[in-house]
Image: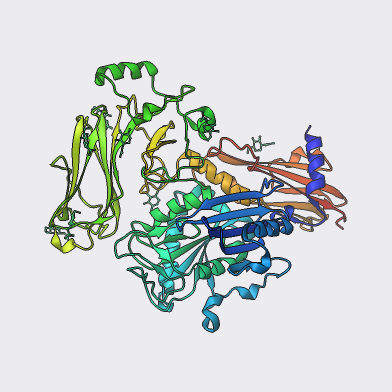
Amino acid sequence: MKRVLFGILLGLCLYAASASAADVTERPYELIVQRDSDTLKCSHLALHDTQHFRGLPESGYLKSKVLETGEERTQFIAETEEDVWERAESLCGPRETWDFHTLIRSTATPYDASQAVLRPQQSTSPQLEVFPLITSGDSSNRVDLVFFADGYTAEEKDKFLDDAFRLAEDISGNQTFYTVKPLLNFWAAFVPSKESGVGVGGEPKDTVFGLYRPGTELRGVYYSKPEVAREACDALGTQCDYPILMGNDPLYGGLGGEFTVITPSLANGPLVLRHELGHSVIDVGEEYDGGFAYFGVNAAHNTTTSGIPWTHWLSPAPDAHAHVHDDAEHHHGHVYGAAEAVKPKDDIRVERAVMPLQDYAWTLLNTSAPWSTRFNSSGQYAWHLVRFSLSGLPNATDLVVSLDGKDLHWAPRADVGVDRWHYDVKLNSTLSGGEHEVTFELKNQKREGEAQLCSVEVLEFGDENEFVTTPGHYSLYPTFSEKNETTYRPTNEDCLMRIVTTPNFCKACVEGLWHALLRRVSLVDSLTPSCSQSTLEPERVLDLSLVPLAHLRDAPVGVEEGYAITWVRDGVEVPAFANQTRLVDDANTVGSYVARVKYWTEEVKVDPEGLLETIVGVVVTTRCF
Ligand SMILES: *[C@@H]1O[C@H](CO)[C@@H](O)[C@H](O)[C@H]1NC(C)=O
Ligand SMILES: *[C@@H]1O[C@H](CO)[C@@H](O)[C@H](O)[C@H]1NC(C)=O
Ligand SMILES: *[C@@H]1O[C@H](CO)[C@@H](O)[C@H](O)[C@H]1NC(C)=O
Ligand SMILES: *[C@@H]1O[C@H](CO)[C@@H](O)[C@H](O)[C@H]1NC(C)=O
Ligand SMILES: *[C@@H]1O[C@H](CO)[C@@H](O)[C@H](O)[C@H]1NC(C)=O
Ligand SMILES: *[C@@H]1O[C@H](CO)[C@@H](O)[C@H](O)[C@H]1NC(C)=O
Ligand SMILES: *[C@@H]1O[C@H](CO)[C@@H](O)[C@H](O)[C@H]1NC(C)=O
Ligand SMILES: *[C@@H]1O[C@H](CO)[C@@H](O)[C@H](O)[C@H]1NC(C)=O
């Protein structure tokens, strides 16, 4: 069985010289098209060769989504250039008619490295200076994240490098992306801006990408020069997989989508960055309430086994008998809430919760009148939570937050200053049936114009038998969209896609992260034959260079993981060199060598596409003398 398998693979992937990950698979071609989702008129098209894409279907890989700008973005990856050209013309019409921004690198118009300049700025176009922040290998076999400077002047270059390094370190040093760090490179790309900072009131400053806030309040940060950003990333070729535009402003702000936009805010920079990267790298939607997009490995739209991507992570439910007993005891005339409107089909339990209030207010507070809102409770839940986010409120005496006139004793996060932050007030009591009121009363007039209520939400929960709050418990937790539609997430609050202040993903997302990265990264950097003269007699040596995971990491990360390596010579396994990255053979041997590399980690339980395995081979045709 094994010999047959290797025999087939030999034909596919053997090269006479050294085999590196980049040439084990031919580089496929990628097409990116952005067009108006109503008129279907194209506004941007990029076509180029790209990093290998494992498991690429013969018909190509196609993904289309609507961006926050309302534009439709289509990505198409295929093996041949003809296929992507064909798709490009089917999306945007015949090539001669294209009158929009294009970035084309194809054999017809070969890529010229001297293009690594931001052209739209014409004669004064500054050179893009690229600095490594945290790197693990050649960009052709890594996923590369690049911070681009906006609103940093020439004098602020060091500040930019410090900010970028701090953020890269925060999200990969000991949390968030730390276990997959050997698959990533972080770079900082600097071009000086003429002015410092990001624009406000919808007016960009004179900066490289023209970042700005629509108003003055802390919310979204938008870009006004997408073509410049696209060219900057394109100029880096395979070194720019995920562009991050960083606006030089100390306070909260950001945006996801085509570019991740962030600020280096001490409190919020890492939060926004890792959350937006979760969307773009793992390709998952939200887990917090009040969003509109729920999809990917962390979202279920129904409660049947086929609809739940994380069945293999589910925890045993608490004792069913206790559940029934508790219901009878605590909820006289039990009324089912939203979560129970859909009864689990094949006995997959849904945690019991409801969201009676949800308001993304984004409103400036004043001292003339408090901001308040009302909601109704069914009176059927064991406890409740008031969840809100604020900015421009540095002092506990600035604001009183109350529920039904009762002060919730809000106090700002230490050292947050005027930056935005998220607060949870958990109240371990049943809300009575009927109407309730939440009030935000600004006390300090000096804060007017800055003090902002960003969002407020009230959630109600069943008791511990109905709604398990324990971290690490995997189940079906209801999430409520902006339209109060229910989807399900894997954990209560383990994931930064729900709780942005938490630094880690849940296991379902981490597994999805491995799959997403290993689709673009091969476990083998290279397999190189050589002749060794280090001993008296010459020897044939084959060196396998692997992505530095498992025992090859710089520092252990505290998860169970390992590499298993099998060597095969001329179709026959060579057990003596099992698990070794170097095979030594007789100097006179010629023939084929294949290494089969399997990586395993407790963070990945299922691997339907075999992404945690790479097979490489070489044919040695000359002897060592
Ligand atoms: C990572 O390190 C930072 C800074 O030393 C620390 O605040 C944080 O708690 C650490 N996180 C984990 C998960 O260990
Ligand atoms: C549940 O969702 C899955 C995945 O979205 C879908 O394939 C399946 O048909 C759905 N089942 C029902 C009963 O709606
Ligand atoms: C959402 O729907 C549930 C169930 O119908 C209801 O109890 C709750 O009040 C609704 N929440 C909002 C914010 O409309
Ligand atoms: C003060 O805030 C309240 C509540 O948000 C609002 O209704 C009112 O219009 C505001 N007053 C002024 C003068 O902005
Ligand atoms: C609460 O329910 C009562 C009775 O159905 C209704 O009159 C009232 O408008 C509701 N309040 C809110 C804030 O929805
Ligand atoms: C907060 O307000 C109190 C009372 O006005 C004042 O004594 C204190 O200095 C303020 N603290 C800050 C950090 O502004
Ligand atoms: C609420 O209090 C009860 C009884 O003290 C306790 O068992 C339960 O864990 C608490 N629930 C929460 C969510 O804090
Ligand atoms: C190679 O390592 C794997 C663990 O990664 C282990 O299961 C296997 O037994 C090892 N093989 C040999 C021959 O030592």
Left-right relation of 117 to 320: right
In the picture shown, does residue 606 fall above or below 396?
A: above
Q: Which residue lies furthest to the bottom in this view?
A: 123
Left-right relation of 506 to 6: left
Whether residue 459 is visible here, answered yes or no, is yes
Left-right relation of 281 to 290: right
Q: In which quarter of the image is residue 538?
A: bottom right
Who is closer to the viewer here, 179 or 266? Answer: 266
Return the x and y of residue 322 as percentages of the image width and height.
34, 17
Who is closer to the viewer here, 353 or 604? Answer: 353
Name the residue rendered at 35%, 56% in the picture. 268
Return the x and y of residue 174 as percentages of the image width and height.
45, 50
Who is closer to the viewer here, 43 or 431? Answer: 43
Left-right relation of 377 to 55: left
In the picture shown, does residue 295 fall above or below 370?
A: above
Quadrant location, ligand no. 4? bottom left
Q: In which quarter of the image is residue 482?
A: top left
Q: Quadrant of the C terminus?
A: bottom right
Return the x and y of residue 64 as percentages of the image width and height.
56, 51
Q: How many marks?
A: 0
Name the residue rendered at 30%, 19% in the picture. 327
Name the residue rendered at 12%, 57% in the picture. 368
Q: In which quarter of the image is the N terminus?
A: top right
